[in-house]
Image: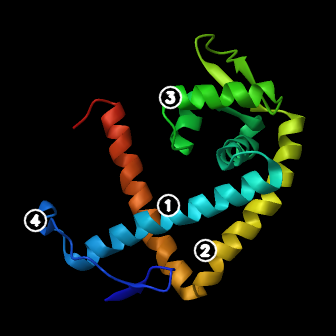
Amino acid sequence: MALSSGRGQTARRRRNPTPKLNPGIEPTRFDAWRSFIQAHGVVIWLMSREMTTATHRPLVWFEVLLYLNDADGGLLTMQQLEDGVTLSQSGLSQLLTRMQRARLIQRVRDRRDARRQLVRITDAGVEQLRAMARVHRASIQRHFADLMSAEEAATVTTVFQRILEAGRQTRGQLRRGED
């Protein structure tokens, strides 16, 4: 298959040089996986760029503010936030420190368990979320929603919900020490 390289040249799609590294994965399903990973990377890159350009804030700040805003009382544990964003524990901690300096979040001790730290969205965080939401909504529309029919969106949702649920179950088992 010929692909445009964007410089007036045509590049040939290379065959997978290591097809045996994925034994047992049916080619159509493996292509779906690769397409998902590549599409995710490109769309997140585009959305991140648009968010940073428009708001001078990284996209991951929007994710954290959204999770907090949607939480009961605007409060989440560190574990709950960690489950929602794709950052390591130390990466999340550093991110929250920057967001706290910007007065978008507060860290507070759990009244029921002083060992646990909770994260709360502030009024300034809610305002920042509103500003970021306009950019986020437009990016989703442009780079995702406009590229599929309602029927395709329903299929994608069904498949990703199934994958998400299976992943959450496995993660829960691993955290509890089950194999």
SS class of the residue under badge 4? Answer: helix
- Sequence-first tag of 3 and 1: 1
Q: Residues within 10 Å of mark 3 (few under 14, many from 20)?
A: some
SS class of the residue under badge 2? Answer: loop
Q: Are marks 3 and 1 in contact (CB under 8 Å)?
A: no
Mark number for residue 20?
4
Q: Are marks 4 and 2 in contact (CB under 8 Å)?
A: no
Relative to 24, say whether 5 is above or below.
Answer: below
Amino acid marked by disc 3: Gln
Relative to 52, say whether 76 is above or below.
Answer: above
Residue at 70% across / 74% down in the picture? 141
SS class of the residue under badge 1? Answer: helix
29 vs 41, left or right, is: left
Residue at 21% across / 71% down in the picture? 16
Q: Are marks 4 and 1 in contact (CB under 8 Å)?
A: no
Residue that mark 2 sits on = 144
Mark nearest the camera among 1 and 2 is 1
Q: Quadrant of the N terminus?
A: bottom left
What separation in Å lies between label 4 and label 1 (alpha carbons)? 25 Å
Relative to 161, say whether 53 is above or below.
Answer: above
Residue 54: give x, y in percent of width and height: 81, 56
What separation in Å lies between label 3 and label 1 (alpha carbons)? 22 Å
Residue that mark 3 sits on = 89
Mark nearest the camera among 3 and 1 is 1
Extreme residue toward the top, this view:
114
Q: Quadrant of the C terminus?
A: top left
What separation in Å lies between label 4 and label 2 (alpha carbons)? 32 Å
* Front one among 103 and 108: 103
- Sequence-first tag of 3 and 2: 3
Mark number for residue 41?
1
Residue at 14% across / 69% down in the picture? 19
